[in-house]
Image (spheres, helix red, strand yellow):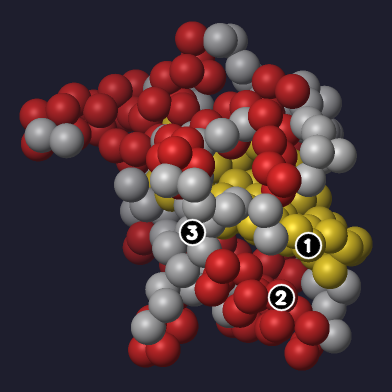
Amino acid sequence: MGSKNKLKRFRENDSFSNVIQPSREKLIADEFPYKGKWSEAFFCNDRPIVAELGCGKGEYSVGLAQRFPENNFVGLDIKGARFWRGAKTALEKGLNNVAFVRSQIELIEHIFAKGEVDEIWITFPDPQIKPKREKHRLTNAVFLNRYKRILKENGTLHLKTDSEFMFGYTQGLLTGLGKEVTYAHQDIYKNHDLKGPLTEIQTFYEKQFLAEKKPITYLKFKLD
């Protein structure tokens, strides 16, 4: 994407009512106005909150918001030029139950309060395969502890990835920590019993992976 297009998208994001772009400094200083107040201050209702981490172009956040109007959805990604597409689509479709926050995932506890989130989706994260990159894997033990703190009791997490390494790493870590894996599949498109958003919503990258005949894996788990 050219720099002109990026700048145009950044400007549009600033004008979108469903996009929030706090500075890192304000987040760290706990000056984010919606932490602990998403229901009352942003969505103006008490519906369950679902977060998508590393939301990319926002296909999952928007797709879930369309299918489940009884929930509120918040997509997080540091690359605003990417989720611009999802934010724009949500506005065009009149979806008032989805928002996007430009932030690093490591700051998630400055965005949501303890027990504020009902469900988390992690869709096609960078597997960070090299050992020295483990600290950046979105399902390492440090990140899992962050998620546990913002999740309600018995909250659910979903990991959807083309990376067999990420799938195996996460499943092994959860087993070692004694966490509950409620569902695991190494190729969801070969399980014809699976219905609904798991296979009906496909991200930009997922379509590319499927065209390359790469299996799409899925884990559903809890951290209590």
Residue 125: image tag:
3
Mark 3: amino acid: Pro
What whole-number distance in Å separates the C-alpha atoms at marks 3 and 2? 15 Å
Q: Which residue is labeled 2 in the image?
A: 171
Mark 1: amino acid: Ala
Residues at marks 1 and 2 touching, judged by CB atoms closer than 8 Å:
yes
Q: Which residue is labeled 1 in the image?
A: 184
Q: Is residue 131 visible?
A: yes
Counting from the top left corner in percent of width and height, residue 71 is at 78, 32
Residues at marks 1 and 3 touching, judged by CB atoms closer than 8 Å:
no
Q: Is residue 204 above or below residue 212?
A: above
Residue 80: image tag:
none
Q: Residue at x 37, y 30 (%)?
A: 84
Q: Residue at x 42, y 54 (%)?
A: 103
Q: Earlier in the sequence, mark 1 or mark 3?
A: 3
Of marks 3 and 2, the one in the foreground: 2
